[in-house]
Amino acid sequence: MSYNEAKEKYSRLGVDTEKAIEKAKSAAISLHCWQGDDVRGFDTDPNKPLTGGIQTTGNYPGRARNYKELMADMDMALSLIPGKKKINLHASYAIFPENEWVDRDKIEPKHFKPWVDFMKKRGLGADFNPTFFSHPMCDPLTLSSPSKETRDFWIRHGKACLRISEYLAKETGEKCTMNIWTGDGFKDIPADRLGPRKRYKESIDEILSEPFDFNLVKPCVESKVFGIGVESYTVGSAEFSLLYASLNKDKCIPLMDNGHYHPTEVVSDKISSLLAYFPEIALHVTRPVRWDSDHVVLFDDETREIMKEVVRCGGLEGRVNIALDYFDASINRIAAWVLGARNAEKALLYALLEPSKSLKEKQDSSDFTSLLVEMDEEKTLPFGEVWNEYCSRCGVPEDGDWLKEVKKYESKVLKERV
Ligand code: RNT
Ligand code: ZN
């Protein structure tokens, strides 16, 4: 079947594939830099353990060992992913000139200048994250620590990151989300649950007291249910984070990561609840397998449902900031990057092809029989043709053609990294 035949089939349902393609092209998805080097960063010993309850597993050869390798790998990945992209950086990816290392509480915009040059050259926006993990000042807590010295260090880090985020927004000309996530919590049953939460709240208040332009920088608070080694108690729980964001709407927004909830809870159902109250929200799109395992995003039911909700709720009109968050070190890292990002794009395009008006009418007129039948049969429409057309219009390979490019790069570039 050709694209034109597929277009015709969709148009019989009242869906304009041309409009969907154009919309998908203009919707930004933020590509996380940390898939390229197993979340290690460049600011501290790269062989230090990853802390904060997150974990990369696998030791596939070819990890990026410095910013030049990471940028080259990112370029390779970007050449295979359709649509508008931003780059999501962590503070630990600061770039220091020889002998000019500074600790996380002293980083400045200038340490991200090479990244700004990278983004500007490629017309990319930027997002940012303070790095509250994998550092000697995690005691193991950070913003919720009982130690004032520890808290103050991380508060200074958070403020420095706000200044860097504003710099990134101004330089790239696009708003920058700045996501506050800490792995603060306990392996075993705490004696005091309230204390750390009060301190966490005060620390975030303190960080956000730094002046910044809320039109340019969107600080987010990301909640979590548990992490590895942090099984019993997470300071920044769902209730904590959502309440924090809702009581501080003038300076921050909530962020939901779909790996951070109990297994039967779905973020696709939460998006509309949050959008009923917040003008803007942020997402981390990932794939949890039994826990927050951050497997590569697939073109699966929940990814499609998340994107459908984003589209249906008007999320693409600047209300939902979409970022990716997964890290797999057991397969070719660039292939992981590309597969996950293509799947997020694919799910977005798929969502844009939903005959939502007529489906909504069926729901509203209680014709649940037609609704169920039509929603299910929609799955076998010739979506693949529209996706291939989208890829080719974006100048990237169709499915079936991109992996060989990654394999070539692997044997030419990655194999040399020993
Ligand atoms: C961890 C959170 C967090 C991190 C990144 C690296 O569970 O999802 O967003 O994955 O900041
Ligand atoms: Zn996340």
Image (spheres, grey):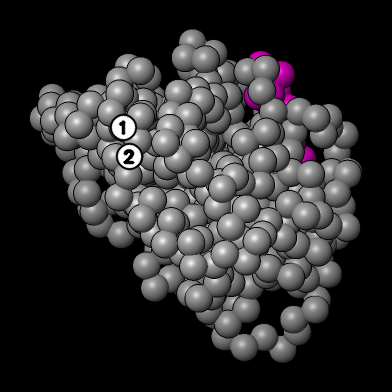
Q: Which residues are magenta?
A: 159-171
Q: Is residue 162 left or right of residue 306?
A: right
Q: Are marks 1 and 2 in contact (CB under 8 Å)?
A: yes
Q: Nearer the viewer, residue 215 or 145?
A: 215
Q: Main secondary structure of the magenta part?
A: helix
Near-viewer residue (227 or 337): 337
Residue depicted at x 13% and y 30%: 404
Which tag is nearer the camera, tag 1 or tag 2? 1
* Residue at (45, 23) in percent of width and height: 18
Q: Which residue is mark 1?
A: 6
* Element under disc 1: helix
State which quadrant residue 322 falls in: top right
Q: CA distance from mark 1 to mark 2?
A: 7 Å
Marked residue nearer the N-terminal end (1 or 2): 1
Compared to residue 264, the image places residue 379 above or below, namely: above
Left or right: 9 with respect to 354? left
Mark 1 packing: few (<14 Cα in 10 Å), some, or many (20+)? some
Residue drawn where x is 30% and y is 50% of the image? 380
Side (left or right) of 287 relative to 142: left
Left or right: 172, with 205 as reference point: left
- Counting every numbered tag in the picture gives 2
Residue at (23%, 53%) from the top-left corner? 330
Identity of the amino acid at label 2? Phe
Residue type (three-letter) at the residue carrying disc 1: Ala
Indicate the quadrant where residue 184 lies: bottom right
Q: Is the residue marked by circle 2 packed among few (<14), some (14-19), or many (20+) residues within 10 Å?
A: many
Expressed as whole percent of the image width and height from the top left, the position of residue 67 reads 41, 28
